[in-house]
Amino acid sequence: MTANRDLAAAVRLYLDEQRCVLDRFPARDVVRVADELFRTYRAGGTVYALANGGNAGTLDHVYADFRLHPFVSEDKSRPVSPGVPRLDFVNLCGSAAELTALVNDVGPDLMFASQLAGRVGLDDFVMAYSGSGNSPNVLRALEVARSAGAQTFVMTKGSGGRCRKSADICLVVPGTSRFPGQTGANDNNFHFEDAILSVNHMLVGLLKERVQEAAE
């Protein structure tokens, strides 16, 4: 019974911390990201997304949502009219072959920057995710994007790291944690990763609303 009570307390701790994150969540930054997303869509630009580790895997989910969900009918029985423009979304983590080739050829710090160089431009939007806010490959990618005139967004946590000054929009997930696995150098990382999908779903839903309005 004691062990079960301890487990229940740990579960409650996680959920209580998550509520605190949501209560303090920087909603205005989500609005700014949505505005940039709409601008990119209207301009026919491309969204480029990048992340490291488990968050690179999450981008497969993000990719599928952005590419598909806004462009099907409400009852999911058919696509919207072919005359409605689709969003061009590129997951820079999408190919293991490409990423490992880049790491082998140009090194891990340039694995994203080299994909953006010569491709990213004024109408585009680069969305990056870095728990520390200091990932060298994310910072180098932001440099390339901003040099090309693209708008940039980073989602991070803690202090925001160097990304806080390197991106046009920096959304810092608030809070700290006592839950096992997300303390110390990993502080608040689970809540940060949960929030990535929450922000993704807000953006996808809002884009779907815009697309449906345009399709009517």
Image (cartoon, rainbow, N blue to C red):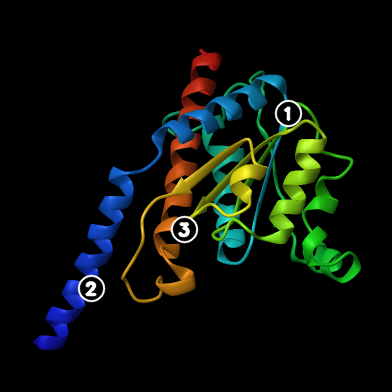
Q: Callout 3: 10 Å neighbours few (<14), some, many (20+)?
A: many
Q: Callout 1: 10 Å neighbours few (<14), some, many (20+)?
A: many
Which amino acid type is shown beneath numbered disc 3? Glu
User: Is residue 94 in sight in this rendering?
Assistant: no
- Is residue 92 shown left or right of residue 182? right
- Is residue 198 shown left or right of residue 46? left
Residue at (32, 44) in percent of width and height = 24
Which amino acid type is shown beneath numbered disc 2? Ala
Q: Mark 2 points at which residue?
A: 10
Front position among marks 1 and 2: 2
Q: Helix, strand or loop at disc 1?
A: loop
Q: Helix, strand or loop at disc 3?
A: helix
Q: Mark 3 points at which residue?
A: 193
Q: Name the residue under label 1.
A: 45
Label located before the other in sequence (1 or 2): 2
User: Does the residue at mark 3 contact the one at mark 2 (Cβ under 8 Å)?
Assistant: no
* Image spot of residue 135 (x, y percent): 66, 60
Quarter containing the N terminus: bottom left
* Viewer-proximal residue among 112 and 56: 112
Judged from this view, the residue extending furthest toward the bottom is 2
Label located before the other in sequence (3 or 1): 1
Which amino acid type is shown beneath numbered disc 1? Gly
Q: Distance between the residues labelled 1 and 2?
A: 45 Å
* Image spot of residue 167 (x, y percent): 64, 41
- Is residue 44 shown left or right of residue 201? right
Query: Is 56 located above or below residue 178 in the figure?
Result: above
User: Is residue 6 in sight in this rendering?
Assistant: yes
Q: Distance between the residues labelled 3 and 1?
A: 27 Å
Residue at (55, 57) in percent of width and height = 58
Residue at (44, 56) in percent of width and height = 192
